[in-house]
Amino acid sequence: MSGSVRVALALGSGGARGYAHIGVIQVLEERGAEIVGIAGSSMGALVGGVRAAGKLDEYTEWAVGMSQFDVLRMLDPSLTASGAIRAEKIVGQFRELLGGALIEDLPIPFTAVATDLATRKEVWFQRGPADVAIRASIAIPGIFPPVMLNGRLLVDGAITDPVPIAPTISAGAELTIGVSLSGDRRGTSTGAPAAVSAEARPFDEWAERFRRGASFLLDRELVRSLLSRFGRDSGLDVDGDAEADSHVVQQADLSKYDVMSQSLDVMQHLLARYRLAAYPPDLLITVPKDACRTFDFHRAKDLVELGRVLTEEALDKSGLLPRRALGGVAAGAVGASDAVGARAAGAAGAIGSGDAAPDEPIAADDARAAAPPASALRAER
């Protein structure tokens, strides 16, 4: 792709919001970008790996065709495994699509990021079976069972690096673009910590604030249920005289999956801010976390379109890869290449110097030699 701007992508974690990555990639390539490296955590690893293998169109067609009923059939609940969902049906889909491809043989250099629970380190998969690496990267704690591979107990890459910029440094790109799926919803910001009192306040003081915040994250019926439980019609003394345990949300009010999903979102959002401060991309595209819930995989069409819209907006605002530069090189983008190259060289030198730091990622490049058979990836049932 002569004359194209060389772009490295860091695709973030975020469940079904990861379908927005598809729209991001579509727009970048429509504007003449040559993708020369991809790193991803969790859903970012799945979409990134499929694109690196040249199978994005097939994957998109499958994802967009999924109904809510299809998604429910794919999720295989388990009461005994180390995850609430066995994930074998989901894994089977992208395993079939990738056809046993090895990461080192993919047309585009690719890194799937996972987390080793035993050593508490980030793991980069840059060699070996792509499907095994992706399976490890998507192992959301408590949701999908972890993967035991070559003496490492592996879970979701988002636990250590929700938007993995560092693995793209060696790609030789002119532009590094990060895609975060944990942004604030539009019109809001994280802001300073909230200093509040533990004393119960009247319902009217906080009901509207809760409704505005929770309605973007939780099911509307659940929000109504919680407001009813704690509100004026609940029979509770909302002025603070009720017993302490009356303020505890019971299991019937909020499922453990809702709590786990929202907790992981908060953690990833804050962790991503720190990691991006250490490795800032040239352009960060942010998908708001209220775009959908974690398991809204039946909304692929809407989320792909959202990714397209947000990418168009980000590129137009930044002046990178302008629309008129289709098939050509944008002067502004090329002008940034020297600074990008200098930053990459400096960061690469820092990573390659001296002994491994305590938080330096493990380069797990031996997945091919000791990759377990598919049956070995199944958690005990």
Image (spheres, rainbow, N blue to C red):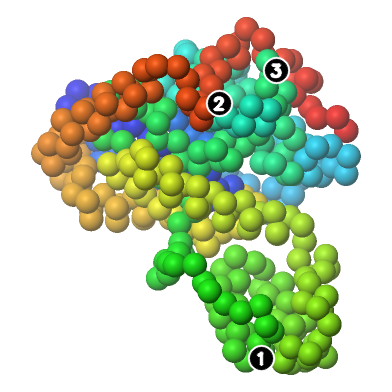
In the picture, measured across the screen, residue 354 lies left or right of residue 322, that is right
Measuring from the top left, give residue 29's x and y in whole percent: 31, 36
Where disc 1 sits, the SS reads: loop
Measuring from the top left, give residue 41's x and y in whole percent: 53, 36
> Which amino acid, by three-letter code, is at mark 2?
Val
Q: Name the residue under label 1.
A: 202
Cα–Cα gap, marks 3 and 1? 54 Å
Q: Does the CB distance between marks 3 and 2 fall below 8 Å?
A: no
For marks 3 and 2, the one nearer the N-term is 2
Is residue 231 in view from this perspective? yes
Where disc 3 sits, the SS reads: loop
Residue 151: image tag: 3
User: Residue 52 or 346: which is nearer the viewer?
Assistant: 346
* Residue ID at (67%, 31%): 117
Is residue 101 in view from this perspective? no
Relative vertical location of residue 208 with respect to residue 375 in this rendering, above or below: below
